[in-house]
């Protein structure tokens, strides 16, 4: 799920920024009903309503006032499973996919009861080392050692980061707040309205008492997937995997666990496996919202955009709501149809019933406007997101990027420092490093780039494919040969606009611009408009002697989003100046 390249998703696994399907989302009119009123811009494909608005879809405009969105309590009639499938109530189809996890306590009997929940085992009162501090110590150790030593350090780092999350929660607030009814009913909608760390603990307590509750195990596994994606701790994926396996051992082939496996595979960037798991889940329950959304995400991340659009249409018909609407908007955006994407996101925001959905969709709208240089509008959307959830990290990161683009570099640095202190993922780390570098503080910048390397090692230890993250960071701030190796590996696995851009830039940075040009052109071929892509293409065109095309690409990048990157925008302006002088 590779949303926009200049967002946090770019460095942390795009899917991380997508809305959790398990979130309580109000059922609204199908996306097709929303977009019917929107004519696709000339030259774009008319894409059916529910097109997977991928993840970060970021866009605003007024939503159609005629569309009415039922209250969140209403459930889709379509959730009645057809004959021959397990009847999954709407709350389960959308909520069973909830993102949660736990492992059986050592004192209990039952399947694999000897595996104690790691989170529960840590004393809540124990001092927790900060995640950034843990990454720094790991980065220092990595510089002193290699090979097996690096692997062992990654394991220790995983423990340190997880302990921090257990003791204080990802936002430092008390994670022991009660979630009414969780341990009794394992209600996914309730879980995702509260603190995720607390939800995990509550679910762990539940499975201690109900070891054979396969649905609870599936929900808990998904919770650990979501927690890992939000706090940047890939070590949680192994625990999620065990919880989902436990669910399948208790009820073979249950759609909740299969959908959970799809989400886990996607989080690890194994999109072929994610597609397979999602298809298997949908065979059991065609109305599983998590599986429907994971299928769209997997197809998008495999570069199979036409199939993703078709999958989004199916999802829209079966489970219209915020998760499907956002994916629909993203597919539209990938085709260059920003107007429809914006309208659908506004409709999704109008139908959002809880703080989590409001924060997510408002952030998506902010990202869209920021990507088009409308920083004031973007900041208003981020403000709305943070009013709904003042701890929503994607909104904080988006606000920081908009601040930087609008000229408030000091404010951007302050905000990004808050983000990376809580979730040191590659995207915000690189963004912060570039802001430090822009103001001349190269020592601090180098520290941020070293932390990216530390996170990458941790992610690999957790089974995550990080070649795209490695290629993007290393091409500008590391070993260009390693960037090219990683980009080629990623291109061999999946051929998306994002991997095409990464490979083009890595080739260019290695001095192989002639080889890079076809990939740079492919990255911009679908109509997807991204200033970083245009900047990369323009620099490659300049290096290969296509001077007129280079002027056009670089001008388009700066007109679209003049503050897309503090260093990139400066380089683009300098290149344009050179081109003008050479005329």
Image: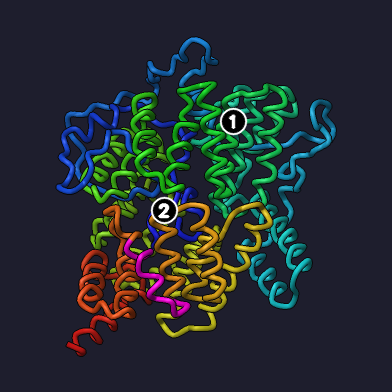
Where residue 49 appears, x then y in whole percent?
28, 33
Mark 2 Cα shell of 10 Å, populated few (<14), some (14-19), many (≥20): many
Dot 2 falls on a residue whose secondary structure is loop
In the picture, residue 191 is in which quadrant?
top right
Callout 1 secondary element = helix
Residue shown at the point (63%, 22%) measured from the top left: 184
Residue 515 sits inside the magenta stretch: yes
Please tell me which residue lies in front, 213 or 166. Answer: 213
Most frequent secondary structure within the magenta stretch:
helix
Mark 2 or mark 1, which is nearer the start of the sequence? Answer: 1
Residue tagged 1: 258
Q: In percent of the image, x 72 and y 51: which residue is there?
A: 125
Q: 513 or 479: nearer the eye?
A: 513
Q: For residue 496, which numbered disc appears in the image?
A: 2
Cα separation, mark 1 vs mark 2, equals 25 Å
Which quarter of the image is occupied by the C terminus? Answer: bottom left
User: At 64% across and 70% down in the image, what residue appears?
Assistant: 136
- In the image, 246 versus 27, the foreground residue is 246
Q: Is residue 14 visible?
A: yes
Vertical side of 477 occupied by 59: above or below = above
Q: Which label lies toward us, 1 or 2?
A: 2
Residue visible at 51% across and 38% down? 275
Q: Quadrant of residue 305?
A: top left
Q: Which residues are magenta?
A: 509-521
State the image coordinates of residue 349 (x, y, percent, origin top left): 31, 39
Which label number is shown at residue 279? Answer: none
The residue nearer to you, when weighing 16 against 286, is: 286
Q: Residues within 10 Å of mark 1 (few under 14, many from 20)?
A: many
């Amino acid at each position: 799920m590779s949303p926009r390249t200049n967002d946090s998703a770019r460095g942390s696994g795009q899917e991380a920024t997508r809305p959790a399907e398990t979130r309580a989302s109000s059922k609204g009119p199908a996306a097709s009903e929303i977009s019917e009123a929107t004519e696709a811009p000339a030259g774009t494909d008319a894409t059916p309503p529910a097109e997977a608005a991928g993840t970060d879809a970021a866009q605003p405009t007024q939503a159609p006032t005629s569309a009415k969105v039922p209250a969140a309590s209403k459930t889709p009639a379509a959730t009645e499973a057809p004959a021959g499938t397990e009847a999954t109530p709407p709350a389960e189809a959308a909520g069973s996919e909830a993102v949660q996890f736990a492992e059986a306590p050592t004192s209990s009997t039952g399947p694999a009861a000897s595996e104690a929940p790691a989170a529960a085992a840590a004393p809540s009162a124990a001092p927790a080392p900060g995640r950034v501090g843990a990454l720094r110590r790991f980065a220092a150790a990595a510089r002193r050692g290699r090979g097996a030593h690096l692997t062992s350090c990654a394991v220790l780092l995983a423990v340190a980061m997880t302990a921090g999350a257990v003791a204080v929660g990802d936002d430092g607030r008390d994670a022991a707040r009660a979630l009414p009814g969780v341990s009794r009913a394992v209600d996914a909608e309730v879980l995702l309205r509260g603190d995720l760390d607390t939800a995990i603990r509550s679910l762990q307590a539940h499975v201690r008492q109900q070891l054979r509750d396969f649905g609870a195990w599936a929900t808990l596994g998904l919770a650990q997937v979501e927690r890992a994606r939000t706090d940047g701790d890939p070590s949680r994926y192994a625990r999620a995997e065990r919880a989902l396996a436990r669910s399948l051992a208790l009820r073979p082939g249950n759609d909740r666990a299969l959908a959970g496996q799809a989400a886990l595979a996607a989080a690890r960037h194994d999109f072929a496996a994610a597609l397979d798991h999602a298809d298997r889940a949908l065979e059991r329950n065609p109305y599983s919202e998590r599986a429907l959304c994971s299928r769209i995400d997997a197809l998008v991340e495999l570069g199979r955009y036409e199939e993703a659009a078709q999958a989004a249409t199916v999802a829209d018909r079966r489970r219209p709501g915020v998760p499907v609407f956002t994916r629909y908007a993203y597919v539209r955006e990938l085709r260059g149809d920003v107007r429809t994407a914006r309208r659908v996101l506004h409709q999704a925001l109008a139908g959002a019933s809880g703080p989590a959905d409001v924060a997510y969709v408002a952030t998506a709208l902010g990202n869209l406007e920021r990507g088009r240089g409308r920083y004031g509008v973007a900041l208003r959307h981020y403000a709305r997101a943070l009013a709904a959830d003042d701890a929503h990290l994607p909104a904080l990161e988006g606000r920081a990027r908009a601040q930087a683009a609008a000229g408030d570099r000091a404010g951007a640095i302050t905000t990004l420092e808050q983000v990376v202190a809580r979730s040191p993922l590659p995207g915000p780390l690189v963004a912060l490093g570039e802001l430090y570098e822009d103001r001349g503080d190269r020592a601090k910048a180098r520290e941020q780039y070293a932390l990216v390397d530390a996170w990458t090692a941790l992610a690999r230890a957790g089974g995550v494919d990080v070649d795209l993250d490695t290629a993007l960071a290393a091409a500008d701030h590391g070993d260009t040969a390693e960037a090219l190796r990683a980009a080629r590996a990623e291109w061999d696995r999946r051929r998306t606009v994002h991997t095409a851009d990464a490979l083009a830039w890595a080739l260019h940075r290695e001095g192989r611009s002639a080889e890079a040009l076809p990939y740079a052109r492919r990255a911009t071929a679908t109509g997807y408009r991204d200033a970083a892509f245009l900047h990369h293409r323009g620099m490659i065109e300049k290096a290969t002697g296509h001077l007129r095309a280079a002027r056009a690409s670089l001008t388009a990048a700066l007109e679209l989003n003049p503050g897309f990157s503090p260093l990139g925008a400066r380089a683009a302006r300098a290149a344009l100046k050179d081109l003008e002088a050479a005329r």
